[in-house]
Amino acid sequence: MGRARMVDVTPKDPTHRRAVARGRVHMEPETTELVARGAMKKGDVLSVARVAGIQAAKKTPDLIPLCHHVVIGAVQVNFDIQDTFIEIEASVDTIDRTGVEMEALTAVSVAALTIYDMCKSADKSMVIGDVTLWEKTGGRSGPYRRAAEAE
């Protein structure tokens, strides 16, 4: 008990691995409308949140103590604006010895925090939530897909 350790991945073969995570920032309809129109005081919310999410994926091992450094091949961060929330989806790809689930989850989380930061002057009631791994491929444990009914 109390013995944190990094898992040894050196015996594993590098394979293509991918992870997809999603999350939401719940907000007032007036706030989503400001974001959609690009009318927020701090600027283009989704462009800044996209860059923040990509940067966060690359910095995950600096934030999560036992995460391995992996060579990230690609990060995509996309948004879907609905009436009362913005959904964030991040996908991360690598060819390495361990997966990129934490990188995808970190990308979503930091993109959500960035949206919050850029919109807080218009809506202090925002809630960040639903940050979830939706898909993972590659590696010894095989593929994982969250059940559709979980949406």
Image (cartoon, rainbow, N blue to C red):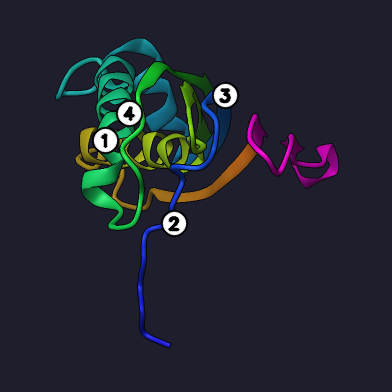
Q: Residue at x 64, y 34 (%)?
A: 136
Q: Above or below — where is 32 with respect to 4?
A: above
Quarter of the figure that contains the C terminus: top right
Residue 27 in the image, given as x and y percentages of width and height: 44, 41
Q: Is residue 75 left or right of residue 129?
A: left
Which residue is nearer to you in this view: 65 or 41?
A: 65
Which residue is nearer to you in this view: 134 or 31?
A: 134
Q: Which residue is mark 4?
A: 53
Q: Which residue is mark 3?
A: 15
Residue segment shown in magenta: 135-151
Q: Badges 1 and 4: C-beta atoms under 8 Å apart?
A: yes
Q: What amino acid is at disc 1?
A: Thr
Q: What amino acid is at disc 4?
A: Gly
Q: What amino acid is at disc 2?
A: Val
Q: Which residue is mark 1?
A: 114
- For the question of whether residue 111 can be seen, the reply is yes
The mark lying in front, picked from 4 and 3, is: 3
Question: Label 4 vs label 3: CA separation?
Answer: 24 Å
The mark lying in front, picked from 2 and 1, is: 2
